Image (cartoon, grey):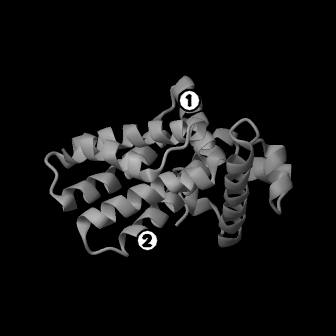
């Protein structure tokens, strides 16, 4: 279901909601391809079926549109990780498969990682971190569940540490690619020792 700003849900028709979603989908593609700086109303209009004027009609604030697009990207990312997790019965195998998929996603789509980091920096500078906090919390919740299933002490604290490690690993993998087996050893020391 689409995430709408407070008070807008009751005022938009199903057709208008569909158009809003088309704009969000176009913004997602632009974010991944061109990064945050390239995610302008003009670029989104060129990517999608609606005009720049329509974008401004449905989103009075481009930052709100970018928040929605980033939330959708993270939701898709987490859905993919959960699909990976669902393939495994053994909690440890599940954890490793999800972590490998997590890192693999950003290796396959490096611009997605850059968009994520650019977004965090931008909302931090604007002192508007609520939307980014929600996405971060969603990832940490998934990691907490995975670590809890393995039987780790204080899975939430370990999940926060693991998320910090993974974010750093995503950046480092762009500079110096290392095999997952090496990263796995580091993760074992961090979370499972």
Q: Residues within 10 Å of mark 2 (few under 14, many from 20)?
A: few
Q: Decide which of tag 2 and tag 1 comes sooner along the chain.
A: 2
| Residue 116 visible to the viewer | yes
Q: Residue at horizontal 32%, vertical 46%?
A: 185
Residue toward you, 139 or 147: 147
**Residue 33 on image: x %, y %:** 73, 49
Label 2 or label 1, whichever lies nearer to me, is 2
Task: Please determine whether, in this image, residue 26 is positioned above or below residue 160.
Answer: below
User: Quadrant where the C terminus lies?
Assistant: top left
Task: Please determine whether, in this image, residue 124 is positioned above or below residue 54.
Answer: above
Residue toward you, 58 or 33: 33
Residue toward you, 141 or 59: 141
Task: Locate residue 16: give its quadrant.
Answer: bottom right
Task: Locate residue 154: give its quadrant.
Answer: top left
Q: Residue at horizontal 47%, vertical 50%?
A: 179
Label 1: which secondary element: helix
Q: Which residue is mark 2?
A: 83
Q: Which residue is mark 1?
A: 121
Would you say 148 lies left or right of 110 here?
left
Task: Please determine whether, in this image, residue 36 is positioned above or below residue 126.
Answer: below
| Residue 130 visible to the viewer | no
Task: Please determine whether, in this image, residue 15 is positioned above or below residue 122.
Answer: below
Report how far apart the C-alphas of labels 2 and 1 lie in the structure: 29 Å
Numbered mark located on residue 88 in the image: none
Would you say 48 lies left or right of 63 here?
right
**Residue 68 on image: x %, y %:** 59, 51
């Amino acid at each position: 279901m689409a995430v709408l700003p407070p008070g807008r849900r009751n005022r938009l028709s199903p057709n208008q909601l569909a158009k809003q979603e088309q704009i969000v989908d176009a913004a997602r593609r632009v974010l991944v391809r061109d990064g945050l700086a390239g995610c302008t109303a003009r670029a989104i209009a060129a990517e999608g079926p609606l005009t720049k004027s329509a974008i401004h009609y449905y989103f009075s604030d481009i930052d709100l549109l970018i928040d929605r697009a980033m939330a959708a990207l993270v939701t898709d990312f987490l859905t993919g990780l959960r699909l990976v997790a669902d393939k495994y019965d053994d909690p440890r195998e599940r954890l490793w498969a999800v972590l490998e998929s997590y890192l693999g996603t950003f290796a396959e789509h490096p611009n997605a990682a850059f968009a994520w980091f650019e977004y965090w920096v931008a909302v931090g500078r604007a002192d508007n971190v609520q939307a980014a906090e929600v996405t971060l919390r969603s990832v940490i919740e998934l990691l907490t569940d995975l670590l809890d299933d393995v039987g780790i002490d204080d899975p939430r604290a370990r999940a926060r540490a693991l998320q910090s490690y993974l974010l750093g690993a995503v950046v480092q993998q762009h500079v110096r690619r290392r095999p997952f087996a090496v990263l796995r050893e580091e993760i074992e020391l961090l979370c499972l020792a």
